Amino acid sequence: MTIDVHAVDGKIPPADERFDVVVVGAGSAGTRAAIEAAQRGATVLLIDEHPVAPALIGTDVPLYFGGRATAAVQQPARMIEQLFAANPDLEAAFDAGVDVRLGTCAWGLYANGPAMRAMPEPMLAIANAERASMIGFGKLILATGARDVVLGFTGWDRPGVMGAQGFAMLLARYDALSSRRILIVGGGELARATAALALDRRLDIAGIVDIGDSAAFGDVPHYPRHSIASAHGGINGVERAVLVSLDTGATITVECDTIILAVAAAPATELLDAAGLGASETTTLIGDCATTPTPDPALLAAWSAALGTTPDTIVCQCEEVSRSDLLGVQPPRYLDRSTSMAARSLATLIADGPAHPDQIKRLTRAGMGQCQGRRCREQVACLLAAEQGTTADRVPVASFRAPIRPVPLAILADWNERADMGEGWDVWFGIPTQWTPYSVIGTPEEAAHSSGNMHV
């Protein structure tokens, strides 16, 4: 049988390790699942990206931490102690024979499907501070929880604006929250749970802000039919928020050092989404990532319209894309904006057909930063929906791909690559006019290659 040396078939190395069951997420649900699998005699790996590196906390990955972590996150050993204190079942997992690895993220999931038929077996890509590796598995259990849904407003890019999930992680699991007086934005169950946690930990709550007519939460100051017009502060971030009545337009200034966005949460299923896969016989979702509902598009649209914004309001913090940049479909500010580019807008784009978040991402870079759109995904969808006269659930979700976590290239470069992986690798670029093998530069073969012959 003739084998095409330019094909990837058969060249992908086998997994570095293999387990009967791999559990991603060492919260209560994931830890219990790992213990049960081990008690049934399976080999089990339990990983959790927490405690995450301080640099990732600073860039709001994986949760929206909002610049309110204390210096305690600089001490990994102390953070691990906190995680064990918050989840005593972790010790039971060790005793049951589970291979527990904290500070280890799952950054990619690879399995044969419509776009891939060359995997030796389903594999999970993981990485810690020292190395990356591929893990083979018989069954994968995702207990990855929920992520924050973020909708911006004027001043939301200041330190001190954070998500409810990030707030709970820093307060309840890390014990590393620097906030003293918080303002909660949202009127549903998530907002009430956030308030209950804050009161339990004796934090001062400046109030709960809701665009609807939700009921008051105990003695906590309550601002129904209000929204945030803007947030203000100094070098340390938020110091006060200006609220506006949706009925009268009157404003109120509330002193606070933290604004918690508790409008909605979304299931953290990025591993499956990036792989183009869903739950199956080999992949199961449990815990919050299985039970958290998709955010109500009508609720997101209402909040997006009510929050105070100006043309200069930042939509994508990573790439500093403003609202006017996005609606004008302008390139990043560090690039030249020609006359033709300045003349285009979202309206001109829509004239050619429905705008897609991926299209917006390529033209403006909104969503291309380290957080991979976690802070701007829903905002972009709401803006596109409003401009097109539709609802956010009818706007496709912007795509993203592995690695779904920032992983140092130095770790990825140390890869178990066999010699035959290098055979014919240049053809994988697929665009002859944009790739010429180094060995033929300056030779007669270079012209032949550029004219369409991919193999030299």
Image (cartoon, grey):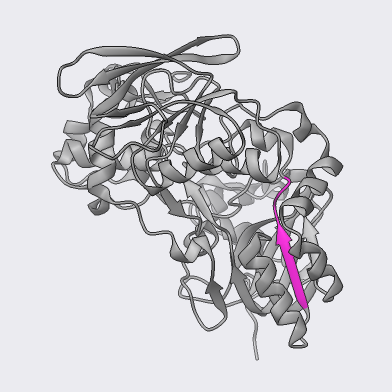
In the picture, which quadrant includes the N terminus?
A: bottom right
Q: Which residue lies furthest to the bottom in this view?
A: 1
Q: Residue 88 location, x and y as percent?
A: 76, 60
Left or right for 310, reference 439 = left
Q: Which residue lies furthest to the front in this view?
A: 219
| Residue drawn 42% across the image and 43% down it | 192
Magenta: main secondary structure equals: strand
Q: What range of the chain is rendered magenta?
A: 44-51
| Residue drawn 45% across the image and 20% down it | 335
In this view, 442 is above or below 88: above
Q: Residue 437 location, x and y as percent?
A: 66, 50
Left or right for 202, reference 355 = right
Magenta stretch contains residue 223: no
Q: Which of 401 and 220 is in front in this view?
A: 220
Is any part of residue 11 visible from this angle? Answer: no
Count of numbered circles on the image: 0
| Residue drawn 37% across the image and 34% down it | 151
Q: Nearer the viewer, residue 159 or 347?
A: 159
In this view, 254 is above or below 291: above
In this view, 136 is above or below 227: below
